[in-house]
Image (tube, rainbow, N blue to C red):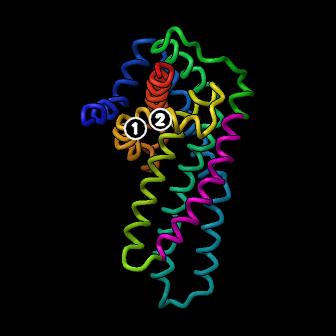
Amino acid sequence: MLQRFWNGMQYVPHAWKLCGSIGIRWMLFIPIIVNVSLGFLLLRYGLTGEVSRRIVDSLAQNASPGIMVFVALLARFLDVVVFILVTYTAVRFGTVIASPLYGAIAERVCDTLLPNQDLPSRSWWGDVTAAIGYEIKKIGLNIGFAIIALILSLVPVVGVVVDVGWTIGIAMIFVCLDVTDASYSRRGQTFRQRAAELKLVLPEAIGFVVVALPMVSVPVVNMFTVPWCCAAGMFLATEAHKRASLR
């Protein structure tokens, strides 16, 4: 069990080496360029920064000199919040825009690790619509899990601890689903089918997420690491599908 957990932690570096050995490492840099470009456009021209600035300016105009320090602190806080939201939004939109490329990477990874099981090809529009559908489903699941987290936080004494544990667990599940989506989406597998396959490689999946979760959670850093972790997720999904086919 511990060896399988350790193997899962190695998927991220192994995926980098695998992409280099089959000549697709350059594909990882295109989503990075998309993420950075979207982040720049959102920060430079988007409404998020403008809205926060207008809020602060409005408060500053109506504030007395005694609370200007509070307004200045609020401005810095809003800048951080906007920056985090912009980087997250850029990565999510970048994943949708670059979904055809992720699909191509998934095909190459599958061809290498499972040469006798071809991953079905799909048009670029099919990849984009599937990615949009996945994001919509994820929003619905997030709302449901957020309601459960709110209920758990109200439990006396242990509510906060349970809520934190629940939130971390859900975050780990979504990371695993996010980075394996390109492979499973190409096969037309439902969330239940994906969960059934990933259950077969649960120790590896946990080890992988322990490494991947910090990489995809840090703002700005995630613009560069999400494509890499997606490649590693395809490695994980292929391993899960291989074990499922042997059963």
Is 108 situated above or below 72?
above
Q: Decide which of 160, 65 is in the foreground and name it.
A: 160
Is 231 situated above or below 108?
below
Residue 198 badge: 2
In the image, residue 214 lies in the stretch drawn in magenta:
no
Mark pair 2, 1: CA separation: 6 Å
Horizontal side of 162 relative to 137 (left or right) equals left
Mark 2–mark 1 CB contact (< 8 Å)? yes
Secondary structure under the numbered disc 2 in the rendered image: helix
Question: Badge 1 is on which residue?
Answer: 202
Residue 15: x and y in percent read: 40, 24
Horizontal side of 51 relative to 156 (left or right) equals right
Horizontal side of 55 relative to 173 (left or right) equals right
Q: Decide which of 54, 239 is in the foreground and name it.
A: 239
State the residue at coordinates (40%, 12%): 21
Is 143 situated above or below 242?
below
**Magenta segment boundaries in residue numbering:** 130-154
In the image, residue 152 lies in the stretch drawn in magenta:
yes
Q: Residues within 10 Å of mark 1 (few under 14, many from 20)?
A: some
Residue 36: x and y in percent read: 54, 40
The residue most toward the top is 116
The residue most toward the front is 247
Q: Amino acid at mark 1?
A: Leu
Residue 217: x and y in percent read: 44, 49
Q: Decide which of 48, 119 is in the foreground and name it.
A: 119
